[in-house]
Image (spheres, rainbow, N blue to C red):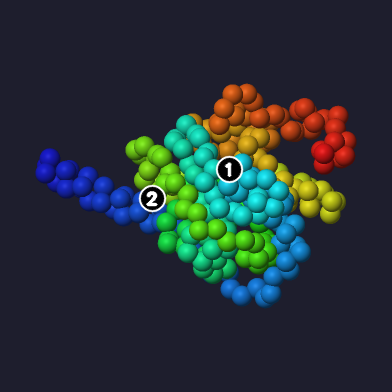
Amino acid sequence: MMRKLIGVVFVLAVVAAIALWFLTAPTFVKFGPLGDPDLARGEEMFWAGGCTSCHAAPGAKGDDKLVLAGGLSIKSDFGTFYAPNISSDATTGIGGWTFDQFANAMNQGTSPEGSHLYPSFPYTSYTRVEASDLNDLFGYMKTLPASDNVAPVHELGFPFNIRRAVGLWNLLYLKEGPVITFDSASDQIKRGQYLVEGPGHCGECHTPRTLIGGLKLNQWLSGAPNPDGEGIIPNITPDGGIKDWSAADIAY
């Protein structure tokens, strides 16, 4: 009887392991041709997304910020991540990527090699960016200067260095669709929501996280500890520190 029980447990464990392997597999979606990119709109997405904040070389100023050489260290409770080179270089950057590879990195957190990207890259927000905007952004980024810089390898201890485990994290936290649901909203509010929740990825810093790094969406934009130093990233909800700000204040 005991041998049968052990056998059943073993079979169930194997089935569970196989199911887990498939559930945690990276996702790759075929976006298909979208036509020529609108480079002006691509530049709008570039600045809305704050790409230079992480991917410009540390200390870069002026036009040098447009050289997306990578190398910035991003410290966290899980280890230190380094922003990669996403310049137009065909070898060390994204110049050799196809649009589908770029779109899957942005929308699915899947690298061109077919592995999970770490969510230090905010694909959990970029998954809400529309394919047409991704097409325009990719087109614009390919016009920017190339760099042959190779960013350092992430410094992560076990078990955070197991990329496949990110698939489990994605099952919990990679969610498409809006964070906030409105019964009705003006075009201006819809546009603002899109920028905040998608390319602007405001929630990635301004929303508190769980012990394993997922956003607490029920506390959306309510402020969070600074993972890279002392202090608090502020509450930017209507009841928070910006409740009396004007549009000009926010723009400034």
- Report which residue position mark 2 lands on: 164
* Foreground pick, 5 / 10: 10
Eyeballing the image, is 96 above or below 64?
A: below
Q: Determine which of the numbered discs, if any, sits on residue 89 in the image.
A: none
How many residues crowd mark 1 within 10 Å: few (<14), some (14–19), many (20+)?
some
Secondary structure under tag 1 reads: loop
How many residues crowd mark 2 within 10 Å: few (<14), some (14–19), many (20+)?
some
* Foreground pick, 9 / 47: 47
Q: Position of residue 24 (x, y in %)?
A: 41, 52
Q: Residue at x 55, y 31 (%)?
A: 227
| Left or right, 235 with reference to 212 | right
Between marks 2 and 1 in the image, the one whose residue lies nearer the viewer: 1
| Left or right, 137 with reference to 7 | right
Eyeballing the image, is 83 above or below 217?
A: below
Q: Amino acid at mark 2?
A: Arg
Q: Mark 2 or 1 closer to N-term?
A: 1
Q: Determine which of the numbered discs, if any, sits on residue 58 in the image.
A: 1
Q: Residue at x 71, y 48 (%)?
A: 62
* Foreground pick, 169 / 33: 33
Q: Residue at x 58, y 73 (%)?
A: 32
Q: Amino acid at mark 1?
A: Pro
Q: Which quadrant of the structure image shows residue 145?
A: bottom right
| Left or right, 153 with reference to 18 | right
Q: Residue at x 66, y 35 (%)?
A: 206
Using the rendered image of the protein, determine whether residue 135 is visible from the camera's viewpoint.
Answer: no
Q: Residue farthest to the top?
A: 231
